[in-house]
Image: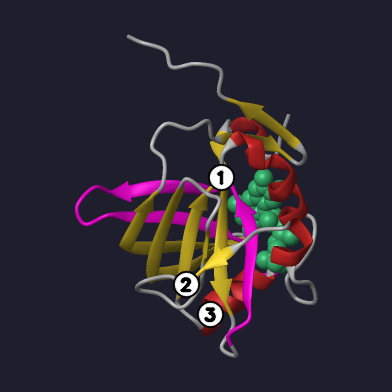
Amino acid sequence: MSERISKLIFPRLVVLITTCSKSGKPNVAPFSFIMPVSFKPKYLAFSVAPTRHTFKNLEEIGEFVVNVPSENMLKEVWVCGTASGKNTDKFMLAGLEIVKSVKVYPPRIKKCPVQLECRIEFMREFGDHYLVVGRILEEHIEQIEFKPILHYSGNEFYGVKEKVRV
Ligand SMILES: Cc1cc2nc3c(=O)[nH]c(=O)nc-3n(C[C@H](O)[C@H](O)[C@H](O)COP(=O)(O)O)c2cc1C
């Protein structure tokens, strides 16, 4: 028996990653193949399929912003995950307001409680995805206590009910 890896390793945090083309056109897409890598300095990693417009932008401008959405942004997440930035302005489509970043070229999403500006330090093909490791250059924390969105696979999500203690 075999199953998609997304149905075996779950739930996973959903983030909205903003990128930018060489010509300055920003884009946004949700990603759930994401993990923290190091405390100090702060590094994180995610995995992107080369078919994504996001991938093209990452190759052009080696920078990105990880925006962590809260539970009430599930609709926006789904809109951004079902259209490609190749020929769509997903910020308009999803009604997401962007603000200028401090250290990187791609913008941040104002409504997201956490926004992390990153520069790529490693990017390599693994199977049908590329692993991207980015160093966090600047962090914006609008809110620390919020309910994130968790992903299973496809259009199936989880919410966080409560904190549990040991
Ligand atoms: C919740 C969610 C999580 C996703 N996670 C990933 C991921 O980790 N890696 C990836 O390559 N695509 C992932 N996708 C698919 C892309 O977000 C989707 O193909 C999107 O339309 C790509 O947009 P772009 O072409 O503008 O980059 C995910 C989609 C959703 C809805």
Residue 59's disc number: 3
The crowding category of the residue bearing disc 1, from other C-alpha atoms within 10 Å (few below 14, some 14 to 19, many at least 20), is: many
Magenta: predominant secondary structure element? strand
The image quadrant where one finds the C terminus is top left
Element type at mark 2:
loop
9 and 65: which one is in front? 65
Q: Distance of mark 3 from mark 2, alpha carbons? A: 20 Å
Marks 1 and 3 close (CB-CB < 8 Å): no
Identified at 50% across, 73% down, the residue is: 106
For the residues marked 1 and 2, what is the alpha-carbon distance in whole angstroms? 18 Å
Residue identifier under label 2: 100
Percent x, y of residue 103: 35, 73
Q: Where, by quadrant of the figure, is residue 116 drawn?
A: bottom left
- As rendered, which of 36 and 16 lies closer to the eye? 16
> In the visual, does 70 lie left or right of 102?
right
Amino acid type, label 1 = Pro
- Circle 3: element type: helix
Front disc: 1 or 3: 1
For the residue labelled by badge 1, is the local secondary structure a helix, a strand or a loop? loop
Amino acid type indicated by mark 3: Glu
Quarter of the image for residue 9 reads top right
Which segment is the magenta one?
24-51
Residue 160 position (above or below residue 124):
above
- Number of the front mark, 3 or 2: 2
The image quadrant in which ligand 1 is located: bottom right
* Label placed on residue 18: none
* Mark 2 crowdedness (10 Å alpha carbons): few <14, some 14-19, many ≥20: few
* Circle 1 residue: 69
